[in-house]
Image (cartoon, rainbow, N blue to C red):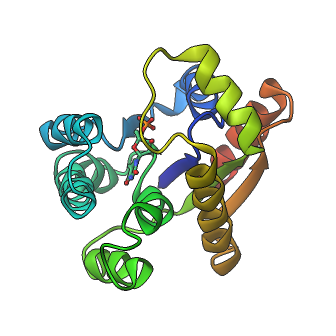
Amino acid sequence: MLVTIEGIDGSGKSTLLNGLLEELKDLNPVFTREPGATWIGEQVRRGIKERINPVAEALLFVADHAAHLDTVVRPALNADKLVISDRYTDSRYAYQSETLKGHIQDPKKWLLDIHNGWTIVPDITFLLVVPVEDSLGRIKRERTESEHFECKNVLENVQQNYLELAEKDPRRFVIIDAKKDRDEILHFVAGIIRKNNL
Ligand code: TMP
């Protein structure tokens, strides 16, 4: 089963994932992430830092996804493992719909088309939703460097894109109010994963 965790920067994904690592130990899940699980993911981080052309950046994210499927996701699913990914395709739909504005005529359609036919759709996607002011506060407290996505306008639109995706696919998405107590969120999410992993 493929589970993905999504949300804007500073929405508490890392806290949730660290909790799941402990909480779901007995299920022996494969924890993975985008970008970062492949060497292309490292180039994506470089691209983000150097603020390369948005189309180039988007294509690097897609290349990382393709390699991620081949090297981590597909082999684990074929071995009947539980896979939990910190970000996945919905990150592209939510973020690159913003970054590609003005560079590509219809970014949402372009992004859907470019993934069509080869990506693997997750079984469950948990979407952490938080007021953007709170997420920016958390980013400021926890990090020394910030990425170009991390400003109010961009994150507002990214979160809106996420919510639209969730509205279109309510069977796959579980929306989480990220302002709730962290243990409450952890037990809720772990409970749903366990129930669906039978
Ligand atoms: P991270 O902070 O979760 O490691 O992700 C790095 C940044 O990359 C984060 O600001 C979200 C962004 N991102 C995209 O813009 N598109 C994508 O497809 C992915 C996976 C991440």
Residue at point 78%, 44% (across, down): 131
Q: How many marks?
A: 0
Residue 198 in sight:
no
The residue lying furthest to the front in this view is 102
* Viewer-closest of 139 and 11: 139
* Residue drawn at point x = 30 percent, y = 51 percent: 73
Q: Is residue 101 above or below residue 149?
A: below
Measured from the top left, where is residue 1 in percent x and y? Answer: 47, 55
Quarter of the view holding residue 99: bottom left
Q: Looking at the image, in which quadrant does ligand 1 appear? A: top left
Q: Residue drawn at (61%, 63%), measured in percent from left and top?
A: 162
Q: Position of residue 151 (x, y in %)?
A: 56, 42
Q: Quadrant of residue 188?
A: top right
* Residue 147, x across and y down, in percent: 42, 35
Q: Is residue 77 visible?
A: yes
Q: Position of residue 66 (x, y in %)?
A: 20, 59
Q: Image height check: is 55 above or below 190? A: below
- Figure quadrant of residue 58: bottom left
**In the rendered view, would you say 139 is above or below 72?**
above
Q: Residue at x 83, y 36 (%)?
A: 179
Image side of residue 11 versus residue 148, left or right: right
Q: Is residue 31 above or below residue 80?
A: above
